[in-house]
Image (tube, grey):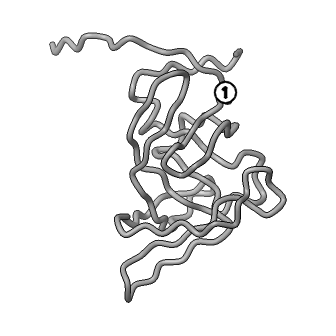
């Protein structure tokens, strides 16, 4: 039998406010999704320039209070095939960035996807929740 000491846990609800300081995003209301393997952030424009090996994204929709129209350019990124909520596989570009949640700061992979038709601009996935969070949906 393997004994694994329990990490100190932080209890969060079904939604939470997050900060993404490296992306200049503050007070983003995100949905916690224990079924999602990784975090996902809404981008209205996602382009991979293969010639320059750059990922270019514009976060949020023009109607959003968080929209700046600024194009973010990443030279360090990966592309992973992820399964969406309908079970379809889709290539999703991802970057490692800092996320602040419930007073704690973490470095995790965040994927960019078009979440225009969804209520929340960000999903918090298991890759962040495994850092010591417990989800209480009554909160």
Q: Residue at x 53, y 52 (%)?
A: 23
Q: Nearer the viewer, residue 55 or 38?
A: 55
Does residue 22 sit above or below 82 in this rendering? above
Residue 17 place in picture, x, y as percent: 65, 31
Q: Is residue 124 left or right of residue 104?
A: right
Q: Nearer the viewer, residue 16 or 64?
A: 64
Q: Nearer the viewer, residue 82 or 139?
A: 139
Residue 48 place in picture, x, y as percent: 47, 78
Location of residue 6 by image quarter: top left
Q: Where's the N terminus, which quadrant?
A: top left
Does residue 10 sit above or below 23 in this rendering? above
Residue furthest to the bottom in view is: 51
Q: Residue at x 71, y 15 (%)?
A: 138
Residue 58 place in picture, x, y as percent: 63, 66
Residue 89 place in picture, x, y as percent: 50, 65
Q: Which residue corresponds to mark 1?
A: 14
Indicate the secondary structure of the residue bearing disc 1. loop
Does residue 9 sit above or below 69 in this rendering? above
Q: Residue at x 67, y 36 (%)?
A: 27
**Label 1 crowd bin: few (<14), some (14–19), many (20+), radius 10 Å:** some
Q: Is residue 49 left or right of residue 30?
A: left
Residue furthest to the right in view is: 63
State how many labels appear.
1
Q: Residue at x 37, y 69 (%)?
A: 75
Q: Where's the C terminus, which quadrant?
A: top right
Location of residue 14 by image quarter: top right
């Amino acid at each position: 039998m393997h004994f694994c000491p329990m990490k100190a846990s932080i209890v969060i609800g079904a939604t939470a406010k997050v900060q993404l300081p490296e992306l200049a995003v503050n007070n983003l209301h995100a949905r916690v999704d224990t079924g999602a393997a990784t975090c996902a952030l809404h981008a209205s424009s996602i382009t991979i320039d293969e010639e320059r090996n750059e990922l270019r994204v514009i976060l949020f929709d023009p109607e959003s209070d968080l929209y700046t129209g600024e194009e973010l350019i990443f030279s360090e990124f990966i592309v992973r095939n992820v399964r969406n909520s309908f079970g379809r596989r889709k290539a999703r570009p991802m970057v490692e960035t800092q996320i602040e949640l419930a007073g704690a700061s973490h470095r995790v992979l965040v994927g960019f996807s078009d979440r225009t038709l969804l209520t929340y601009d960000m999903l918090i996935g298991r890759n962040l929740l495994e850092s010591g969070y417990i989800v209480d949906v009554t909160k």
